[in-house]
Amino acid sequence: MSFTPPPPFTTRPQLRGTFGMVAATHTTAAAVAQAVLERGGNAFDAACAGGFTLHVAEPHLNGPGGDLVGLFQAAGADEPTVLMGQGPAPAAATIDHFRAEGLDLVPGAGALAAAIPGAVDAWLILLRDHGTWELSDVLSYAIGYARDGHPLLPQAAATIDRVADLFRESWPTSADLWLVDGAAPAAGALHRNPAYAAVLERLVAAGAHAASRAERIDAARREWSTGLVARAASAFAAVPHRHSTGGEHAGLIDEADFAGFEAGYERPLRARFRGRTVFKAGGWTQGPALLEALRILDPLEDALLDPATPDGAHTIIETLKLVLADRDAHFGDGSQVEWLLTDSATDSRRRQLGDAASAQWRPATAPDGSAWQPSLRRPDGTVVPGTGEPTVAKSGETRGDTCQIDVVDRWGNIVAVTPSGGWLQSSPAIPELGFCLGTRLQVAWLDPASPSALAPGRRPRTTLSPTLIHDGDTTIALGTPGGDQQDQWQLPMIVRMLAGGYSAQEAIDAPTLHTTAMVDSFWPRTWTPTGAVVEDRIGAAVIDGLRSRGHDVVLAGEWALGRLCAVGRDRATGAVWAAANPRGMQSYAAGR
């Protein structure tokens, strides 16, 4: 049986050329990155310029106080490299401290949940080591938009409106930055952030007298980690303020935490699927869950992989339940998770796939006999403004997402980066800086037995999860926002491309699905045992088939799930391509 063929119509063409391509979750970031390519910059220059622009263009989805994970392959390199931009917990962030504050979970909003910001330093080391442009040129786009204004997306305006009461009543500095005469701004209104423009200008000025391009960028990194940002953020966070719990707490991050962090590089993990090699970051991310899913699915017949059929949709959902249980039982900073990708482990997990929807939380048992179990909290319907990763509601209703930018150039450099955190609703805005701290510590557990337990200097197990694929002569870079759904939405896309023969644009456009039968990574960390969310376009046969197998199916709407972007390059011909997601009407690809 062959895969269900893609429809003859796609929402946009898959762009093809030979010069360079960009795909991003915001049109302005895509345009900025392509402008850098047109001016002679390489993929890394372009990604950095677009990444800083995303701080201004999608402030409800990411910010300078947040984090990122990237995967890239430089021209001539044999394999990809992980760009590690996830800061760890501050030195004072102990489980005992949080327990003493009367907490059983890390809050979903407020500076107590702040990890050390990692995104900015990661962008800067990528530019230093693999880019060609001066920092002043790379940052000029973001500085211009921050100082002169950028139109607010409808989703950004809606996000501000949802948290306007919180801002007015409890976070006055955020009200000063984001509200207009005490009210949420209109969609499309120009928003200016001169404080953030000044922060970026300080980074440029820090290296004005340095002798080389690399030294100028390192001077900017020192300014970020030891200058105004570290001083102002630490002092501001230390003042007690309202958190998602409803109580007031002081943040723990201090100047020494900023000074002690550096972004860096790591080797990726990999797995084979249908003759291709898929690369992900390590067990401090959720990325290995996608590799495990692909290993489980690899030997199955196409009929059991096709998301457009009842059998395929069921198999994918049940596989996702298994690998996400493994994520929560075994993943964390320092965890060795390669055993989950072995033949014995994936064969065992494959045998657990049944004909009916499982209502059990079923992690694999590690070779040492361990399998940590979190508390399984069912949703109670409570919504607290400002909390969680701005991704999708359990119903599939879009509340916002993370960001994504992918770039490939004519020299063969390719990069995928997923920035997130530090969104405007995560904690109060720091007046001198024009941004707030992130809340990534909320994915850490206050249980020392957890592989992702909160501990000073330990990275929280992040959901950020870009992907690189080697498909013969073609290298593919892709990713999506979506919190716990990031690898869930990537799985049907990759299966459709590598097993079903879809183009990237066809696979992005195709109706998709995900499960909610996993422990939510974000506060208040709930679990829905048989939950499945699907786009209505997936069809009555699939929907009825899932329900008949015991899945609790929620219809998300016609075009609701995923914000996938992808670029690729054929090494043999030099041809490049790009594809972007139509959902939300803000992602775009550009290139020639």
Image (cartoon, helix red, strand yellow):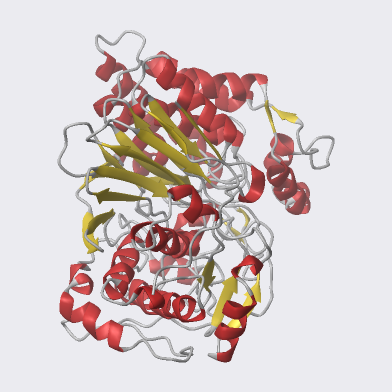
Number of disc labels: 0
Closer to the camera, 558 or 2?
Answer: 2
Q: Could you tell whether 484 is left or right of 295 in the image?
A: right
Q: Residue at x 57, y 54 (%)?
A: 110
The answer to which image quadrant residue 544 occupies is: bottom right
| x, y percent for residue 60 | 62, 45
| x, y percent for residue 340 | 23, 73
Closer to the camera, 42 or 326?
Answer: 42
Closer to the camera, 446 or 238?
Answer: 446
Q: Is residue 352 among what the camera can see?
A: yes
Q: Is residue 118 among what the camera can see?
A: no
| x, y percent for residue 151 | 70, 30
Q: Where 463 falls versus 195 (above or below)?
A: below
Q: Residue at x 43, y 50 (%)?
A: 503
Q: Quadrant of the N terminus?
A: bottom left
Q: Residue at x 39, y 68 (%)?
A: 95
Closer to the camera, 36 or 189?
Answer: 36
Q: Where 63 falls versus 272 (above or below)?
A: above
Q: Where 516 falls versus 47 (above or below)?
A: below
Q: Residue at x 46, y 34 (%)?
A: 51
Q: Quadrant of the C terminus?
A: top left
| x, y percent for residue 198 | 55, 21
